[in-house]
Amino acid sequence: MLKPTPMKHVRLLVLTEDLPRASLALAETQCFHPDPREPESERFATLPVRPFHDLHTQAQSRLDKIARLIRFEPPTSLEPMRVIEQDELARLNDWLGRLWEEVSNYEEDFRRLDDAERLIREQQAALENFRHLNIDLGMLRTRTRFLNIHVGLVPRENLRQLEGAVALAGHILHVYLEGHDTVHLVIVGPSDDHESDLSPVLAAAGFQRLPIPEELDSEPAKLQRQFARRLDAIAEERATLTETLERWSEPYREPLREAQRTLRLAEPLVQLDSALRSTGHLAHLAGWVPARALDALRRRLDAALAGRYALSVRDPLPEERPLVPTVPVKGRLLAPFALLVNQYGIPSYGEVDPTPLFALTFLIMFGSMFGDVGQGAVIALAAWTLRGRLGRFWPFGLMAGGSSVLFGFLYGSLFGYEHVLPALWMNPLSDPLLMLRLALIWGVFFIVLACLLAIYNRWATGQWRESLFGHHGVVNLVFYLALIAGGTGLVDGTGFGIWPASLVAGSLLVLAWHSWLHQQAPVGEKILVVVIETLETLIGYVSNTLSFLRVAAFSLNHVALSIAVFTLADMMGAFGHVVTVILGNVFVLVLEGGIVMIQVMRLQYYEGFSRYFSGDGYAFRPIRFGRGPA
Amino acid sequence: MSQVANQAYLNTRVSVMTTRLFAPGLIERLAQLPLPTLAEEFGLAPLLDDQTTPAVRRRAVEQSLIQLLLSELLVLTRSMEVNARALVFDWGRKYALYNLKTLIRGKLHQLDRQQINDNLFELPAHIRLADKELFGAENVLELLRRLEAGPQRQIARQAREVYERQREPFALEAAIDQRYFIGLTRRVQGFGAPDHDWLRRLISAELDRVGLLWLLRFRFTYGLSPSETYYWLVPSMRLLTRDRLLHLADLDSFEQVLEALPAPLNVLIADCRSIAEVQQRLARYAIDEVRLVLARSPSAVARALAYLMLRETDLMRLFAVVQGRLLGFDDQTIRHALAQIEPSP
């Protein structure tokens, strides 16, 4: 499970006319990851499906836009499979273009209604202000012989410029209401030649005229009713428009569904675009395929192309290793952990996929730091209840809660009560030193495991020198184990020991020598760097091991927090006691649960991944059929 | 890193990068360099690709020069704090706006995807528009509506409203440029001393130059009214302030405007007879101001932006020479073109 899926590099030569059929076959097997590198032969210089790609992109974009207004069920199946030729795609694209032109009219109608509604709401807001203006509002409605009056609104950001421009046109501007994005204003000026100067300015500033209602100065309540009626009318118009659109679009639903099916069938060829080159009637395609899927691929190509193809297969070359995609681990339980691993990086080809190990050690550490039957059950129950919302992440909550329950039984802890359940092992606070010692042992085990993985990963990817002398390589591991052996001797009172001391000194000397050989600097600088690096190795391993004390510290902290909650609860009456215990548990769940999660992630990323996991690979993404409108 | 450390780091970075600016001698020499020498000295490999047409080579060189400039911009922004980075990105977004204008013109003239695509710049993620989304638009209005849903909301909204009313590209592009400059001046307002004073000086030098040129063109070449001319201008924070622009836009002749200009612009362009002449002198003035900021400013972000402006001017000079050579112009014509190069805000 830890080993990567072996991959093969394949080169497929097919007739250009068979490309659509070949793409369908490749998509059906879901095992072909395109390799976009140029072919070795310079004869393959043409991009044969680029026009097909462009047509598909435009058609899909049009369908997505249409789907915003016309709801239709996506195709449930792509059967029967059929080849989509460029002519068919072009015809579909044209049809979608014509349909979009009509649908966009509906979209504009909906926008027009939105604008009308917004305008009425602006008028409603302005109503109160008009009522308090100490002027004859009738004057604002009518164009007089000498005065030119504009009442309306502009976007707030245009106001400052408009003020100056209006002044130059011989008008004055008065703002009577400021909204969030817009300002309401009155512009007044003489009815003369300047009026024609003002029109383009108002248009440029996005000035929107506000009609002054006839009844404004007499019956505001009536006016409000009128506004409400107009809003109702708009709502009704919108409903009618929706209904009309529904009726109008009815005959198009099935063709649109079929269009979606066609685009999905055409998508595999589009995905191959970057990896396809051709010359004349011959097309070249390269990609990566899992070794186990080769036979299935051959069978499918035989069936689809009736033997009119040439497939050459080889192992990835050493220099190609960074380009080989990694097949992710599968499994519902591991999926959420894989998401967390991918936050750090994708394993490069040849590296051990750390997901299973990450999952196991994560659960052990989380449970031991947050061991409580009740609180763990709450986490698991919450994950189960919210599984719809959490998507693929819910098993993570379920398993973390389960681990917490398991350790809760070992610690005998139920919602912080330490004497309700008999501890299967012991309460952490009853022997803190043992807890700390166990945490250190766990830390040593974890670091040794990480070093072994680092050694393996480098060895597997051909970096044998790095696996011996590099960071966390064999020499580092010897040094660390000797240091631990010597340290244990010191604690036991038997002294550091000659062998451990010799191994520590020897390995440090080897590391120093290796570092010296790789420095390109003056002698003084080399000495300085080597001394600092050696010291860093020593300090780094000691501090990294001590870092695992937090595993014990948090298990103790959990008990201590519970004691604090119960001390507070005991100071209350019966009702207060219950409330404090409940709130205290919520507090512990949220705050401590969150902190423990962060601490475990930190240990995994920093103490684990940074040692053995480069994370600079990229995921295996085979071509497949499209998934429908965005 | 602390504020002081950031300033020190950025200042050092700028000082190191300043050595890349063209020396006066090199600018003189540029007009005489043949294509192979240009390609060798400035690493412009596409120039020597005989398989492609001069237009394709010109485009490839332009693209690589812009990428060079924007990669330096990204390097400088790494150590900047949030406001400074936002200002510098906003400055660089003019290339995204060039792309937007290309898209709009392409849609207006109903060019196909490939033709539009050939004229778009490849831009880094921090600066580019959501080109893929915008490409899907079938016409200008749809394009602007799509743009409204993204970070260019303010520009797009105004542009759409202008276009819906006037249906012509001048107003649309003027609205886009105006929003861009207003955005820059607003960014500068958010800085404290000493950044604010020096950034104000830097941006104002550009706004004074652009403002005066626009004023002269809109009033006397396009024949717009004083009020419409003023509406499209962006007041600067130094010379051509709001009140001065109001006064200047209301004048009736080219000569009257030149006479009414504040110092030092009045002396600088007193005897100019054409807008082209004004443009050339203003360019020199703006470059001097930018150089002064780079040399004397204690503000690291102002120096970084000044460096980018000068660097861009240098790269434009280089591009002008390349273009001249590809078109087969003589040294004299190329030298004349070099004199027209102005810093772009």
Image (cartoon, coloured by chain):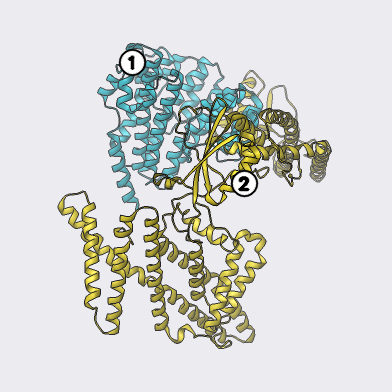
Q: Which residue is mark 1?
A: B335
Which chain appears yellow?
A: A
As rendered, which of A517 and B108 lies closer to the eye? A517
Q: Which residue is mark 2?
A: A29
The answer to whether residue B340 is visible is yes
Which quadrant of the view contains residue B22?
A: top left
> For the point 65% across and 19% down, which residue is it?
A192
Which chain appears cyan?
A: B
Judged left or right of residue B95, residue B264 is left
Q: Secondary structure at mark 2?
A: helix
Circle 2 chain:
A
> For the point 31% across and 79% down, which residue is it?
A488
As rendered, which of A538 and A586 lies closer to the eye? A538
Which quadrant of the view contains residue A305?
A: top right
Which quadrant of the view contains residue A384?
A: bottom right
Q: Amino acid at mark 2?
A: Thr
Q: Quadrant of the C terminus of chain B?
A: top left
Q: Is residue B339 above or below residue A233?
A: above
Q: Nearer the viewer, mark 1 or mark 2?
A: 2
